[in-house]
Image (spheres, coloured by chain):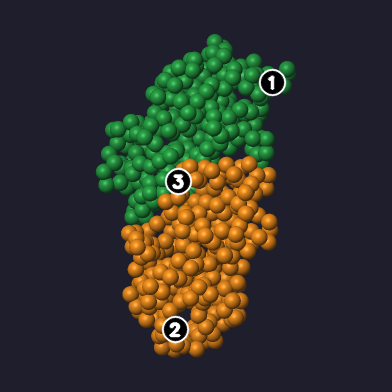
Chain colours: A orange, B green
């Protein structure tokens, strides 16, 4: 397959999305996508550097890795770039005290952050915690600020659980943006700085890296804008009827990964 | 006051917003805005035609009018242009069977509508019913449709209750638009067709009418785009720090209305 080797020429590192690529989340932690445990093991035996780049913002990095290891994936916490730790760095750097509109599962990541007298809002995939009351509280905090700052952990439209498609944080971020007349700062894919930090942690230049994901905008488009190549899997939230203004360098079925 | 008479020259009809102009909604139905019962009575004694044009979508027209009459306002159901009855006409005309993401208080307006096997979503100000589960259900219905139709009863950003500012339907409409990659059809202000139907029901041409409202976009901007004049009250959701790309023809404090 000449086309394959051409498209992947010079690749030294692989950035892997997690949800929709390794597993589908859901009740009881979800299920691994068939073939993905073996594909990851094969990747790790290869010469390629591997790092995980996720927008997961319902679970702490530790909980997520524990869940994946339990499913049989060869993954450790230090290999994962996740938005909550990246956000904590930003909050500390800028002296921001967030009102947190987040899922209880990720609250531990913010344990060291001062949340008194908030001067910004941090929104993550809060799931069932996206009640009207919680959304309205975040809205009211923003409207009270002279210079409202909204930090969004990713801006995904939706993701796939075992029970079906689920609204992601991006939809709720849009709601607050519209209500307050502001623009959120995104920490996570497809923000260029987020990909850059993952590449830096992997020790690979963007032209030597390929991103593997199921999200045509967040994974594929975002990585390409950073100078990476992108490979789209047809698992997770992949849908045939996506409006394709973004085009992946490679599109494959799960069973081919690593070949 | 020469400026006043010039600005209001030729006005034969007055369209009045309700929430934030007549009353602030809230616990127990809310409270009348000081002076507004008397101002409306004075308007009705004048030569001017009066009609009410609201985006209220939590209460049925009957319940809203009952509440306002109880507060002392001279208002009857036939004088009110409201989005739910207007939406029912559209649904019937186009053979649409809605999944309803609405407040229980307005469900009676849709009693005659077939909601089996939905081929569209109708979203209104659902308040506490904007749970994650209900939002996700509406999202899933839209994602299952080949040609997803989302009808939004108004597109307000927020409104004022006695307890503070509250997220309005527009924020949640934006969330679904973003998640599904679609654009909602708005039934309510500032949609031009909605103002036109209110003018028609009042029997007044747009250049002979003035809209009185507290919303710079929904009331003032919308009315002006239809050729009406617009008067902004500094009650309800009015805020001094609005980005003013829209400019009202007249801005007054409540106590001046009708003078």
Q: Secondary structure at mark 1?
A: helix
**Circles 2 and 1 in contact, beta carbons < 8 Å:** no
Percent of width and height locating residue A13: 53, 82
How many other residues sit within 10 Å of disc 2, few (<14), some (14-19) or many (≥20)?
some
Q: Secondary structure at mark 3?
A: loop
Residue where numbered disc 3 is placed: A131
Percent of width and height locating residue A6: 49, 86
The chain ID associated with circle 3 is A
The chain ID associated with circle 2 is A
| Residue sitting nearer the eye, A120 or B142 | A120
Residue A231 appears left or right of A178? left
Residue where numbered disc 2 is placed: A43
Percent of width and height locating residue A230: 50, 75
Is A26 placed above or below B36 here? below
Q: Is residue B248 visible?
A: yes
How many other residues sit within 10 Å of disc 1, few (<14), some (14-19) or many (≥20)?
few
Q: Can you tell which of label 3 and label 1 is closer to the viewer? A: 3
Residue where numbered disc 1 is placed: B4
Q: Can you tell which of label 2 and label 1 is closer to the viewer? A: 2
The chain ID associated with circle 1 is B
């Amino acid at each position: 397959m000449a086309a394959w080797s051409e498209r992947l020429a010079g690749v030294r590192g692989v950035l892997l999305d997690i949800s929709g690529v390794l597993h589908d989340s859901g009740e009881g932690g979800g299920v691994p996508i068939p073939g993905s445990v073996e594909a990851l093991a094969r990747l790790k035996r290869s010469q390629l550097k591997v790092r995980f780049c996720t927008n997961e913002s319902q679970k702490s990095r530790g909980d997520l890795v524990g869940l994946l290891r339990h499913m049989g994936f060869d993954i450790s916490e230090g290999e994962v770039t996740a938005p909550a730790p990246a956000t904590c760095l930003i909050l500390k750097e800028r002296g921001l005290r967030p009102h947190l509109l987040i899922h209880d599962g990720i609250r531990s990541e913010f344990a060291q952050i001062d949340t008194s007298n908030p001067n910004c809002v941090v929104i993550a995939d809060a799931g069932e915690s996206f009640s009207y009351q919680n959304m309205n509280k975040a809205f009211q905090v923003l409207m009270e600020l002279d210079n409202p700052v909204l930090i969004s952990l990713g801006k995904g439209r939706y993701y796939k659980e075992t029970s079906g498609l689920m609204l992601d944080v991006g939809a709720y971020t849009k709601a607050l943006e519209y209500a307050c007349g502001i623009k959120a700062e995104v920490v996570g894919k497809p923000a260029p700085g987020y990909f850059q930090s993952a590449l830096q942690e992997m020790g690979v230049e963007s032209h030597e890296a390929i991103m593997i994901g199921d999200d045509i905008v967040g994974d594929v488009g975002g990585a390409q804008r950073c100078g990476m190549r992108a490979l789209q899997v047809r698992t997770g939230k992949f849908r045939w009827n996506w409006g394709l203004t973004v085009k992946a360098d490679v599109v494959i079925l799960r069973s081919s990964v690593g070949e």
